Amino acid sequence: MNNQDTNTVKQTETVAPVTNDQSTTQATAPVADTKSAETVKLELTAKEAEMVQDLLSDYDYAYRSDREVDCKRELVPRDKVGKYPYVAEPPAPEIINPAYDWVNKKWYSKSGSTSLPEIAQAVKTLQSDQQVGTTQNLALTKAVKALSEGQANQNKLLASMQNLMLQMASQKQATPTQPTTDNQATGKQENGGN
């Protein structure tokens, strides 16, 4: 088996005829290749098949996510699964360009775009915020209108008070009053009396 053939191993065992007092096991393993699917047939002795089985039982698939690799499925020793950089659970299929956040212990979209459920939630939030903003805008508009009307009413009241004061001042100037003295105010007479 060469390096390309070790990517994926799926073992199916069949017993081949015994030759020279040795039992042989025939294993077929499909080879993962992005260009074409090939099947490689291996002939192993029972001892070799047992060794391969033992080796494979110590390994499991995990998802590597670190600085060099965003997300790659790899066969790793079982004791490394769940420890940096090997994540046990795969990313959700709706996550675009997944990478693992080791601090928050979750998969996220590294490409800047987010998953479809996150986009749908963001749209709902924006719609809700827009509705709240519109309601607040209407309330503020009403308050500004009420303040403007109040200011206009105050200006009218102030103008009428100024007119009234002007009228009172002009009436005072038109009809002079006789000055009063302190003696008249106290009720004393100046005419002789003792």
Image (cartoon, grey):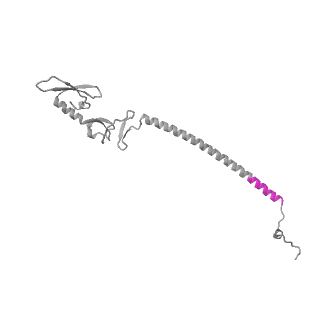
Residue 75 picture location, percent across and down? 27, 35
Q: How many marks?
A: 0
Asked whether, in this view, residue 179 is left or right of residue 127, the answer is right
Q: Quadrant of the N terminus?
A: top left
Instruction: Look at 78% across and 54% down and name the residue there.
Output: 167
Instruction: Look at 76% across and 54% down and name the residue there.
Output: 164
Farthest-out residue, bottom: 194
Q: Which residue range is magenta in the image?
A: 161-175
Q: Quadrant of the C terminus?
A: bottom right
Farthest-out residue, right: 192
Instruction: Look at 26% across and 38% down and name the residue there.
Output: 78
Vertical placement of residue 55 versus 104, above or below: above
Asked whether, in this view, residue 19 is left or right of residue 177, the answer is left
Q: Quadrant of residue 101?
A: top left
Asked whether, in this view, residue 104 is left or right of residue 166, the answer is left
Instruction: Look at 68% across and 47% down and name the residue there.
Output: 152
Q: Quadrant of residue 70?
A: top left
Residue 99 picture location, percent across and down? 35, 38
Question: Magenta-highlighted stretch: main secondary structure?
Answer: helix
Residue 117 picture location, percent across and down? 43, 35
Farthest-out residue, left: 20
Q: Is residue 169 magenta?
A: yes
Residue 20 picture location, percent across and down? 10, 25
